[in-house]
Image: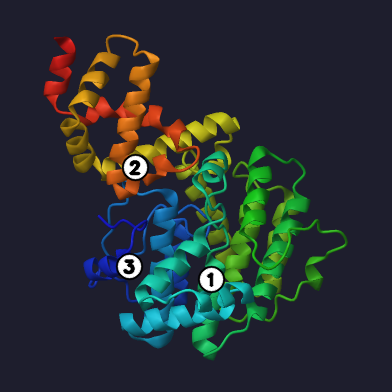
């Protein structure tokens, strides 16, 4: 399985999928349709656009999104360049990200030692999907990844077509996206938790502008005629659909707005219908998984998110973790006794210390050593009986 949280995942992804990439030729419409159905457009990726689906179980939401971003960028590269030269793609995408990074970030990069083109790309992709930088803020927030990631795909497309790119394209497109979204929100008569969280998602995803109220803004004044490519138009239409979606039913005013937007974008009626139908089907199928629709108490959400994080880490390091625990005889005895009696304070300290020592030996588990990492230990301990061999359980019975 590919692990996008450690170095080398891009090389492995290309090797394993060398014959699995879809050749869209010059078919932008099919490419966008696939991207939309994968959930990438909606900020909740459920699949990758490959000939044969790959197993995404065990991967976190941000890891799946990271792979989806790479795959989408490679697809648009192949459409424009009409080739599948991986090395040239990696060079081009790194040059693209260097172009759009903030000046202070570029200055910092000059001070740091440079790695290989692949490692630079891994760092760039990681930076683009994140909106929360540490594990604690991530787990307390419903907002984990960048909701406007398709802007990267559009900007990369612009860069490849024109062989250059200024940040002006990204700034203007992002601003126009938010204007469209703001107008759509203003039309909704009843606001729900979904709308509030979606606004936060857009706010956290902005890089060049700020989320503002519409004020006296009118659809007619937004310069959308400049966008010639179908994927640009359809994306703007889909963002409006996201903002207007509530219960699969569009009010009269909302329908009027969407029709005006489609007309201004010069998008055919059948594309508007497809946009409306697709988001309804997608949300109906994945509503229970999409964070916007599962608002919860922040403390409960933190526990759920942390539980998922620790479970993922344990699953990936099961063999090594099991071996280290078994080799620690005193820890094994204390863990066994903890299931039949309450450990005293000294014994609890020993368990904590020895578990942290084990975590030091497994790089992926160093999260437990970070400030605040101690609160994750009870979750780790909860999964230990499932990791250990049957002899461990038999000892408990004895």
Q: Which residue is mark 1?
A: 152
Q: Residue at x 42, y 77 (%)?
A: 114
x, y percent for residue 83:
33, 85
Q: Is residue 254 left or right of residue 267?
A: right
Q: Residues within 10 Å of mark 1 (few under 14, many from 20)?
A: some
| Label 2 element class | helix
Label 2 – label 3 distance at C-alpha: 20 Å
Does the CB distance between marks 1 and 3 fall below 8 Å? no
Q: Is residue 131 visible to us here?
A: yes
Above or below, 157 against 262 in this view is below
* Label 1 to label 3: alpha-carbon separation: 18 Å
Q: As rendered, which of 236 and 254 lies closer to the eye? A: 236
Q: CA distance from mark 1 to mark 2?
A: 28 Å
The quarter in which the N terminus is drawn is bottom left
**Which numbered tag is attached to residue 259?**
none
Q: Which mark is residue 10?
A: 3
Image position of 305 with respect to 7: above or below: above
Tell me which label, 1 or 2, sits earlier in the chain: 1
Classify 150 as above or below 368: below
Work out which residue is located at the far bottom of the displayed protein and give it: 163
Residue at image x 53%, y 84%?
A: 159
Q: Residues within 10 Å of mark 3 (few under 14, many from 20)?
A: many
- Position of residue 285 in the picture relative to residue 357 (left or right): right
Residue annotated with mark 2: 312
Outermost residue toward the front in this view:
346
Closer mark to the observer between disc 1 and disc 3: 3
Seen at 72% across and 53% down, the residue is 254
Classify mark 1: helix, strand or loop.
Answer: helix
Question: Foreground: 87 or 282?
Answer: 87
Front position among marks 1 and 2: 2
Q: Which circle's residue, 1 or 3, is located before the other in the chain?
A: 3
């Amino acid at each position: 399985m590919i692990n996008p949280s450690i170095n080398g995942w891009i090389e492995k992804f290309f090797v394993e999928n060398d014959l699995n990439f879809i050749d869209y030729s010059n078919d932008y419409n099919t490419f966008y349709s696939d991207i939309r159905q994968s959930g990438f457009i909606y900020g909740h990726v459920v699949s990758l656009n490959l000939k044969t689906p790959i197993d995404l179980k065990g991967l976190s939401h941000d890891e799946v999104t990271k792979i989806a971003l790479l795959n989408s960028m490679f697809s648009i590269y192949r459409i424009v360049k009409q080739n599948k030269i991986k090395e040239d793609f990696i060079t081009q995408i790194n040059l693209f990200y260097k172009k759009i990074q903030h000046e202070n970030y570029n200055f910092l990069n000059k001070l740091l030692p440079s790695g290989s083109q692949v490692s630079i790309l891994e760092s760039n992709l990681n930076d683009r999907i994140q909106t929360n930088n540490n594990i604690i803020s991530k787990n307390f927030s419903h907002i984990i990844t960048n909701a406007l990631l398709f802007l990267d795909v559009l900007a990369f497309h612009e860069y490849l077509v024109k062989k250059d790119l200024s940040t002006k394209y990204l700034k203007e497109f992002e601003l126009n996206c938010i204007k469209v979204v703001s107008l759509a929100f203003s039309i909704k008569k009843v606001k729900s938790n979904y709308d509030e969280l979606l606004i936060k998602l857009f706010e956290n995803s902005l890089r060049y502008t700020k989320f503002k109220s519409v004020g006296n803004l009118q659809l007619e004044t937004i310069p959308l005629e400049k966008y010639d490519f179908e994927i640009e138009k359809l994306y703007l239409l889909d963002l409006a659909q996201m903002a207007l979606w509530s219960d699969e039913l569009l009010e009269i005013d909302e329908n009027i707005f969407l029709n005006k937007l489609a007309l201004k974008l010069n998008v055919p009626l059948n594309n508007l219908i497809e946009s409306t139908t697709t988001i309804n089907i997608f949300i109906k199928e994945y509503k229970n998984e999409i964070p916007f629709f599962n608002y919860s108490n922040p403390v409960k959400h933190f526990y759920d998110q942390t539980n998922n994080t620790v479970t993922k880490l344990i699953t990936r390091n099961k063999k090594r973790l099991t071996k280290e625990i078994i080799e620690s005889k005193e820890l094994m005895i204390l863990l066994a006794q903890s299931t039949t009696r309450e450990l005293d304070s000294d014994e609890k300290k020993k368990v904590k210390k020895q578990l942290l020592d084990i975590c030091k030996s497994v790089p992926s588990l160093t999260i437990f050593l970070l400030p605040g990492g101690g609160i994750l230990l009870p979750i780790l301990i909860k999964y230990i009986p499932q990791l250990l061999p049957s002899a461990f359980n038999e000892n408990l019975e004895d």
